[in-house]
Amino acid sequence: MKFAGAATLPLSLGISDGRLFSFHNSGHRAPVHALVVVLLLLQPPPRPPTPRPPRCNPPRPPTLPHHPPMPPFSRTARPSLHASRRLLSTLPDIAPAGLPPPAARRLPKSPAANLAPHKMRELSRQENLEKRQKYLAPSLRAHYANSPSGALKLRSGAGQYLYCSEGRRYLDCVNNVCHVGHTHPRVVQAAAAQLSILNTNSRYLHDNIVRLAEALAQRLPDPLQSVFFVNSGTEANDLALRLARNFTGRQDVYCVAEAYHGHSAATLAISPYSKYSPSEMPAGVVKLSQPDTYRLGLSEAEATDRALAEYRAALASGEKPPAAYIVESLMCCGGMVSLPEGYLRGMHELTRAHGGLCIADEVQTGFGRVGTHMWAFEPQGVVPDIVTVGKPFGNGFPLAAVITTPEVAEASNKFEYFNTFGGNPVACAVGLEVLSVIDDEQLQHNALQTGAYAFDLLRQVQAQQPRVGDVRGTGLLLGVELVLDRATKAPDSEGAQLVMARMKELGVLVSTDGPHRNVLKMKPPLCFNVADAEELAKVMNQALSELPPLV
């Protein structure tokens, strides 16, 4: 046997007795190990390495001080798979103290392996309650838990109606989150269509984001045109405080007793409503009295004068110059208290005279709910420096916003702000459709007309029921305050809870609020109609009639 390229060498190969030998031309037989040397000499010179494309060799990051430098990557320097296995087989089993060697250990079964398939069996009401008690924090209370039939387990919703797991229909008079109605088909379609294409954060350009910002700014008075998108009313009010404090260089914020502005640390501080004990207000917060004409027994003009005098006195010392004055345009959690005529104008003038900004919290009151205007601050002829919106904006989808002036927004460049989910393409698609539905279905006009009719019906209930001390509100923001005595106005907190529970049993959902929890609160979806108003009044009258008579 001869090798190509070996003609010039006196060499050939042969096999004798099953062994490989090399033969010189002289006939001498040499063992094969001599051949190895010859074969090595016959190897062609190594080819220069082919350079890789730049994308395959990215520059290495700088070496950290506590790490030794890594050797350059080389495929030829890598040990073979068999060599690696041989090396590993020689290493002793090493385990932390108290653990068996690796061979004796087995990975636990992943909890994900126990998850049910996508289509899950519906839990019974009792199973749901048991899991809720086991896995949810106790502060997350289930609504109507103390009613005779217990907490309400919902299955679906449509328009102004909710349906429980037993299939019973309830008239929803309190869930103002679903502003244009539960599962409105246009809103559902807008969300599904955008979600099927793209959803990401707001770092990128997307038409939905700028279109919604434009549509929102066009619905507010000038110069409110700079928009920040967030996910909730709490986030909106939190950011509003940050903007005001940054712009003015001050810390003190003036708020109203019984106000509610959110559940973050900053917004809880300006939400006296949320405090269950008479603890002192946090530093940087000054509380002012709520201008409740019914409780004060004053006319609107008198209540306004009283509130302005209190605010003027608080500012007079100069010890706490305001960064901002913040107020709900109608005090929802404070008991559905409408602000008296002239109140907002006077408070805004005092705030600005002392260098502060005016913040209107429209999270519960905005988007046409008051009927007469798109925003609840508008009837008083004022323009805030900052407006916050939330709850109904996304019709149940997380969407909220802060709208301010270009001047205030420009000052925000002093700090960094980013919101991962605020104003994402899906949320903005939903917001755009909500605004379109409000316009197309004339829901603001419906709030005005149906709200006025419902108000008159509730006044008729008041005429028949001595427990009803006051009926108040505007549009589809209505409150009925229950008292034990109309002369003393002693709050009937227990009666309000009983009426709420009984109305639920009769198929109408309301809530209670106010400092004494004695105000029945109604904030239905804006598709609420005349027949719904009649059902509300009828059921409330029946529930009140079933209470024990007042002594």
Image (spheres, rainbow, N blue to C red):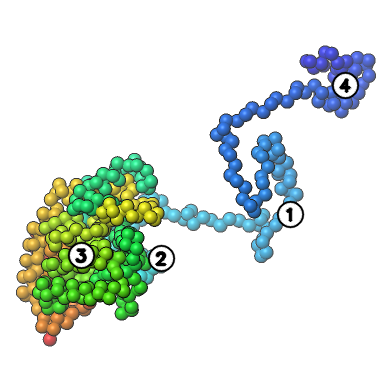
Residue 243, quarter of the rendered image? bottom left
Residue 446, quarter of the rendered image? bottom left
Give the quadrant of the N terminus: top right
Residue type for callout 3:
His
Q: Which residue is mark 1?
A: 92
Q: Residue at x 19, y 55 (%)?
A: 367
User: Which is nearer the N-term, disc 3 or disc 4?
Assistant: 4
Q: Residue at x 9, y 78 (%)?
A: 466
User: Which is nearer the N-term, disc 1 or disc 4?
Assistant: 4
Q: Residues within 10 Å of mark 2 (few under 14, many from 20)?
A: few
Q: Where residue 354 appears, x then y in whole percent?
A: 25, 67
Q: Which mark is residue 22?
A: 4
Tell me the SS state at disc 3.
helix
User: Which is nearer the N-term, disc 3 or disc 1?
Assistant: 1
User: Which is nearer the N-term, disc 4 or disc 2?
Assistant: 4
Q: Where residue 27 appears, x then y in whole percent?
A: 93, 16
Q: Which mark is residue 135?
A: 2
Q: Residue at x 90, y 17 (%)?
A: 24
Residue type for callout 2:
Tyr
Q: CA distance from mark 3 to mark 2?
A: 46 Å
- In the displayed structure, would residue 229 be above or below residue 332? above
Residue type for callout 4:
Ser
Q: Answer left or right for 549 relative to 325.
A: left
Q: Which residue is mark 3?
A: 348
Q: Where residue 442 appears, x then y in whole percent?
A: 12, 50
